[in-house]
Amino acid sequence: MSDHQTVLIIEDEADIQTLLRTVLTRNDFDVLVASDGLTGIFLAKEHHPDLIVLDVGLPDMDGWGVLEQLRSASNVPVIMLTAHGTEADRVRGFGAGADDYLVKPFSNKELIARIRAVLRRSQPAQAQPDLYNDGVLAIDFIAKLVSVNGRLLKVTPIEFRLLSAFAKSAGLVLSVQQLLEAAWGNPPADGQDRVKFSILRIRKKLGWSESGPIVAVRGFGYRYDPPSNAVPDEVLPQHPEEPS
């Protein structure tokens, strides 16, 4: 039996099917393919894939209907695949239980990065690393400590949860909805403004600017760009300091 993770592709366009299968296979995933929603639902129940890439436009039922049926029986991670990248579509997808949203056309690297990020976020809590450290930002997820450039800082619970979400998906874009769920759990009505102003406060507290390492990606959300020279995990200092 294979030790590889399995991805189910529910997509009716043959050329995209082929592309997805090829890219995923080359990156050591086992692949299942369905060309319509009903077949996809059957394969999901029969084989219990680790993740599903689900096209919104299918011949028998749309992706929203497929997602609804999947969510009624399973919490399998789902990445929605669509040709439309409007904010309304993204909000609908995340509200219906999608884990991420990928707009055609997309690069092979982005596809694999998003799949791996979603799989990483979906792992049980005990499988998550206790410490993140990229040489600039270090987070002890157990002790709830944050250090920047070797200096431990005082952060609020909301700031800690936002920074943790960025660290766990470093280099990838997180939507406002994903950040709301990570930091607030039950997103408030004024959620978009809360994310915006919380990130502004984080930048000010940590001495960062709009140019990075937390950058806004217009129409999609925010991304944390770690330095290229990541360092090994190490213990954080135990006495928080206020930033100068």
Image (spheres, rainbow, N blue to C red):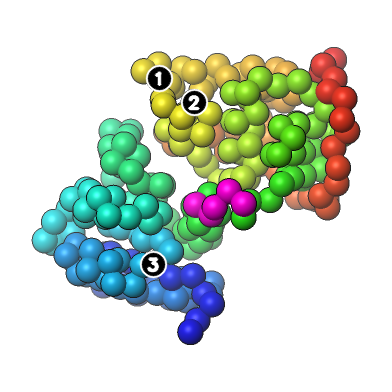
Q: Are marks 1 and 3 in contact (CB under 8 Å)?
A: no
Is residue 123 inside the magenta stretch? Answer: yes
Q: What residue type is labelled 1?
A: Pro
Q: How many labels does the image show?
A: 3
Q: In this view, does 1 lie to the left or right of 93?
A: right
Cα separation, mark 1 vs mark 2, equals: 8 Å
Q: Residue at x 81, y 49 (%)?
A: 233
Q: Which of marks 3 and 2 is nearer the N terminus?
A: 3
Give the label on residue 184, or none. 2
| Image position, residue 239 (x, y; %) | 87, 25
Q: Which residue is drawn at 65% across and 41% down?
A: 167
Q: Can residue 16 be seen in this view?
A: no
Location of residue 142 by image quarter:
top right
Q: Which amino acid does label 2 sit on?
A: Trp
Q: What residue type is labelled 3?
A: Pro
Residue, far front:
126
**Above or below: residue 209 compared with residue 16:** above
Range of residues picked out in magenta: 122-126
| Image position, residue 216 (x, y; %) | 54, 31
Q: Is residue 153 visible?
A: yes
